[in-house]
């Protein structure tokens, strides 16, 4: 499931809420510059640290929420400050208790940079990967941007690059979900 939307719309915050922990680094300014795949498999399966999130980097396990979050933040910062190209990280983790029934390793949520950050070449590459490989997307849209050109552009991109998402079968679940964020009442 790709989690897409404008820069700074709350994609990472939304994912952290689903995960039930502040695992992915988020700021009030654009900070995501890499693909971060969160596999819901419960984290470390057994033994010391069972249930903790982890990722592998260069054959070494990085374990625990704080260490994983720090590593992802450093990767995002590096990608924003250099011409490093596409980076992606795979994090094994659990989810909030209300969603624990899907924590079997078959569900993966992917955090991506804001689609409207055209000054970063890696953003286009991230969009293509998410469009091609995700079986579903969650589109986050600010309440004030529901009818914006940016939202139209994102949906047009998905129609053109992820046509498979728009041809759901009767016996399959919905493949596109919209979440309206930052609603000021």
Image (spheres, rainbow, N blue to C red):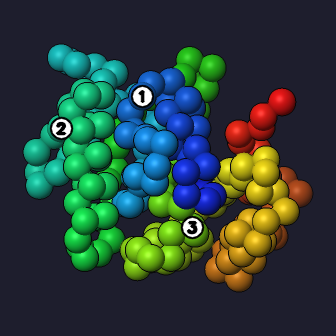
Q: Does the residue at mark 2 contact the one at mark 1 (Cβ under 8 Å)?
A: no
Residue drawn at (34%, 21%) of the image: 51
Residue drawn at (50%, 24%) of the image: 20
Q: Is residue 177 visible?
A: no
Of mark 1 and mark 3, the one earlier in the sequence is 1
Of mark 3 and mark 2, the one earlier in the sequence is 2
Any mark on residue 115, and which? Answer: 3
Could you say which quadrant of the image residue 89 lies in?
Answer: bottom left
Residue 148 spot, x, y in % from top left: 79, 65
Q: Does the residue at mark 1 contact the one at mark 3 (Cβ under 8 Å)?
A: no
Disc 1: which residue: 22
Residue drawn at (61%, 26%) of the image: 99
Residue 44 spot, x, y in % from top left: 28, 28
Disc 2: which residue: 62
Residue drawn at (34%, 50%) of the image: 90
Mark 1 lies on a secondary structure that is: loop
Q: Nearer the viewer, residue 110 or 12?
A: 12
Graded by Cα atoms within 10 Å as few (under 14), some (14 to 19) or many (20 or more), the crowding at tag 3 reads many
Residue 72 spot, x, y in % from top left: 29, 46
Q: Nearer the viewer, residue 77 or 184?
A: 184
- Closer to the camera: disc 3 or disc 2? 3
Mark 2 lies on a secondary structure that is: strand
153 to the left or right of 27: right
167 to the left or right of 12: right
Q: How many marks?
A: 3
Q: Nearer the viewer, residue 1 or 11?
A: 11
Q: How many angstroms separate mark 2 from mark 1 (CA)?
A: 16 Å
């Amino acid at each position: 499931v790709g989690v897409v939307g404008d820069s700074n719309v709350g994609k990472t915050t939304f994912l952290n809420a689903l995960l039930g922990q502040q695992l992915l680094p988020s700021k009030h300014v654009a900070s995501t510059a890499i693909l971060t795949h969160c596999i819901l498999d419960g984290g470390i399966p057994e033994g010391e640290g069972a249930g903790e999130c982890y990722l592998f980097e260069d054959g070494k396990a990085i374990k625990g929420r704080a260490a994983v979050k720090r590593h992802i933040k450093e990767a995002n910062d590096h990608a924003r400050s250099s011409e490093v190209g596409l980076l992606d990280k795979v994090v094994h983790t659990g989810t909030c208790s209300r969603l624990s029934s899907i924590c079997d390793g078959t569900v993966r949520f992917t955090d991506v940079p804001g689609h409207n950050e055209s000054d970063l070449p890696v953003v286009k590459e991230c969009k293509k990967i998410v469009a091609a490989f995700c079986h579903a997307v969650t589109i986050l849209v600010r309440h004030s941007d529901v009818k914006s050109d940016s939202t139209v552009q994102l949906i047009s991109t998905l129609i053109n690059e992820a046509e498979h998402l728009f041809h759901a079968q009767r016996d399959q679940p919905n493949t596109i979900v919209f979440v309206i964020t930052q609603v000021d009442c």
